[in-house]
Image (cartoon, helix red, strand yellow):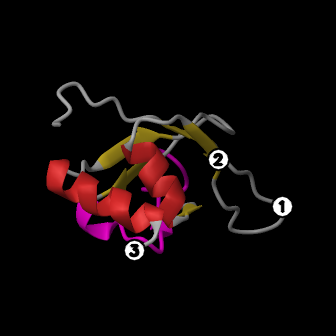
Amino acid sequence: MNLSRQIITELSEAGFMDISTRTKKAVGHDHMLVIRKDEMTDAGGEFETDPGESDGHIHTVTLSGPQLVAIQTGQRLEIKTSKERDDQHDHDVVFMVQRLNPKG
């Protein structure tokens, strides 16, 4: 079992949490990003923002399995969203989970 899978297993037993955050504003708007605990895997994945108060566009955030583990264990992570086109903007996203009552 690799380390991230072991930590994911332990977090699953301790209670994985859904993650929700807002992107930082760019071009006068922001987006909400929600990653549900059942979407989190050792392989990571691509997660889409909502359209927010924009013109209906969305952005994608790509997170690896180790990044998901880092977020779940309370480490702060800041990344950029995708751009739909080369001439479009992106957003910064800050992830930080605070576990108020950790088990163990």
* Residue on which the image places disc 1: 87
Residue at 53 percent of width and 34 percent of height: 76
Q: Nearer the viewer, residue 18 or 73?
A: 73
Q: Main secondary structure of the magenta part?
A: loop
Point out the frontmost of discs 1 and 2. 2
| In the image, residue 103 lies in the stretch drawn in magenta | no
In the picture provided, is 94 more to the left or to the right than 3?
A: right
Q: Which mark is residue 79?
A: 2
Amino acid type of the residue tagged 2 in the rendering: Ile
Q: Residues within 10 Å of mark 2 (few under 14, many from 20)?
A: some
Q: Check the picture and name the quadrant holding the C terminus.
A: top left
Q: Which mark is residue 8?
A: none
- Point out residue 100 in the picture as x, y percentages from the top left corner: 22, 25
- Point out residue 33 in the picture as x, y percentages from the top left corner: 42, 50
- In the displayed structure, would residue 97 be above or below residue 40? above
Residue at 41 percent of width and 35 percent of height: 74
* Residue on which the image places disc 3: 1
The answer, for residue 51, to whether it is visible in the render is no
- In the displayed structure, would residue 72 be above or below residue 40? above
Structural distance between the alpha carbons of marks 2 and 3: 28 Å
> Element type at marker 3?
loop
CB atoms of marks 2 and 3 within 8 Å: no
